[in-house]
Image: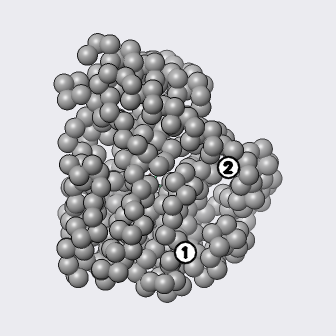
Amino acid sequence: MFREVLNYIRPYDAGIFPEDLYKKYGISEKNVVNLGSNENPYPPPKSVIKEIVKESSHVNRYPDPSYPELKQKLSEYTGLPIENIAVGSGASEILDSICKITLNPFDKVVIPIPSYSIYILISMLRDASIEYIKTEDQNFEFRAEQVINFGKDVNLIFLNSPNNPTGKSIPREEIIKIIEGTNALVVVDEAYYEFSRKTIAEKVNEYNNLLVVRSMSKFFSLAGLRIGYALSNPKIIEMIEKVRLAFTISNIAEKAAIKALEKQNWYLKIREKIIAERDFVMREISRTKGFTVIPSDANFLLIKLPAKVNMSAIMEELNKKGIIVRDVTEVPGLKNNYIRITIGKKQENRAVISALRELSLKW
Ligand SMILES: Cc1ncc(COP(=O)(O)O)c(C=O)c1O
């Protein structure tokens, strides 16, 4: 009665939440340093919160399922016409819709790894056949040829730039070579675009096989409201609109996103703080014995730990101090011990640096 593939799928592991630390160690949520999910540590500006409260009195009504106002604002933000834009409940919904429009059972998908593990999950749910490119031994980089060599019968390619969990951007020339060298739909997930400022979005009308995915969860501090969007040529956008469920963005989320897009200067100041902190954390942790930090274009850092350490003991020690980081050792494509830390507020970053220093004294 149920699908075979479900026997092989584990639900997405979102890591540890502050409530878990309260239950386990009695640490109250306000004292938790939560650097596990690449979120923005700052809540959105007051005007966005006000808009959320204001819109809450209209929740007896459905939102307009074509979201014209939000698309108009995104059009101004991206510089692309609204025909090039589809919106969804987070980048996650867009990614799932992409699989729905491209994949029949046994169709081929290419995924360089390590990367955002949802790509694997949603491809498996379409019974697709996944080809991986392992990048850890190549300094987490890959060449276009490695992707193109899988041949002309590939349906879908997932690229992530900057990539989660490595923080590395894919060079523009390589992305273009891949788009031009394949018949597959090339998805470039730019969830962290605002931190890198590197994008391929202006090319979506030049190719019939390019789709850029963006998220408002990171730079725009709206992870809890679930807003993402796709940028692609109108034909692909139309297909996304066909498979997407109506009303998946609430009217509260839509209005908050519109307001946030009007407040870019506020967000740019936050961005500067996060980037300066990221570079500080990178320098400090690189100086600490036993840690290797991968340079990042995003709001998080991937850090390699010595082979001898016990990762679950380390996570427990950090959690006991009220610190949440992500153990990504089990992410497909990683062979060594790694943690990923999100850049938080100044004090939070100092707390994680000193906790890691303390740990390293025992090695
Ligand atoms: C690379 C990447 N893409 C997409 C997402 C999901 O974003 P959203 O919250 O918009 O669904 C994430 C979330 O961590 C991510 O890291």
Amino acid type shown at disc 2 = Leu
- Residue 24: horizontal and vertical position, in percent? 42, 21
Amino acid type shown at disc 1 = Glu
Side of 7 relative to 230 (left or right): left
Observer-nearest residue: 166 or 247? Answer: 166
Residue 64 visible in the snapshot: no
Observer-nearest residue: 310 or 203? Answer: 203
Side of 143 relative to 326 (left or right): left
Query: What residue is disc 1 on?
Result: 202
Q: Are marks 1 and 2 in contact (CB under 8 Å)?
A: no
- Residue 68: horizontal and vertical position, in percent? 69, 75
Quadrant where the C terminus is found in the figure: top left
* Residue located at (46% from left, 41% from top): 300
Label 1 crowd (10 A; few <14 / some 14-19 / many >=20): few
Identify the image quadrant of residue 128: bottom left
Query: What residue is disc 2 on?
Result: 268
- Residue 327: horizontal and vertical position, in percent? 33, 35
Secondary structure under tag 1 reads helix
